[in-house]
Amino acid sequence: MRKFDKKAEELIKQIIAHSLIFEEEGTKTRYGVYKEDEFLIAEDIYNTIDKVKQFIINLKKVISVYIKIIEEIFQVPENELKDMETLKEMKGEINKWI
């Protein structure tokens, strides 16, 4: 079992909390879901922009926390991590959707 300082532990907990929606969505988009004695296909599940928006908001939160972990916990200089720019670009693109 790994041990982290309190700040890292809190950030990791945030990622887990914001990622639950992705775990739950894993098979819904492919197979649908059986809910309240009714089978719903993906088109029925994502029938409002609010549901899609919530998904996108959570994605932005996860990316934001990853950036914070890389910058503050691991203290990797941005110029040494080309993927950091990609994460920041993704966050910027996501901002256009919400």
Image (tube, rainbow, N blue to C red):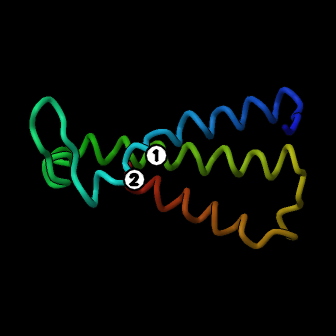
Q: Residue at x 88, y 34 (%)?
A: 3
Mark 1 vs mark 2, CA separation in Å: 5 Å
Q: Amino acid at mark 1?
A: Glu
**Dot 1 and dot 2 residues touching (CB under 8 Å):** yes
Give the residue number, with chain letter if any, for mark 2. 26
58 shown above or below 88: above
Q: Amino acid at mark 2?
A: Gly
Outermost residue, top side:
6
Rendered location of residue 59, percent (x, y): 49, 49
31 shown above or below 79: above
Q: Which mark is residue 23?
A: 1
Element type at mark 1: helix
Outermost residue, bottom side:
82
Q: Residue at x 84, y 37 (%)?
A: 1
Quarter location, residue 76: bottom right
Q: Nearer the viewer, residue 59 or 89?
A: 59
Q: Nearer the viewer, residue 60 or 19?
A: 19
Q: Is residue 80 left or right of residue 91?
A: right
Q: Residue at x 47, y 43 (%)?
A: 58
Q: Is residue 73 left or right of residue 49?
A: right
Rendered location of residue 30, percent (x, y): 27, 61
Rendered location of residue 60, percent (x, y): 52, 48
Q: Residue at x 67, y 44 (%)?
A: 65
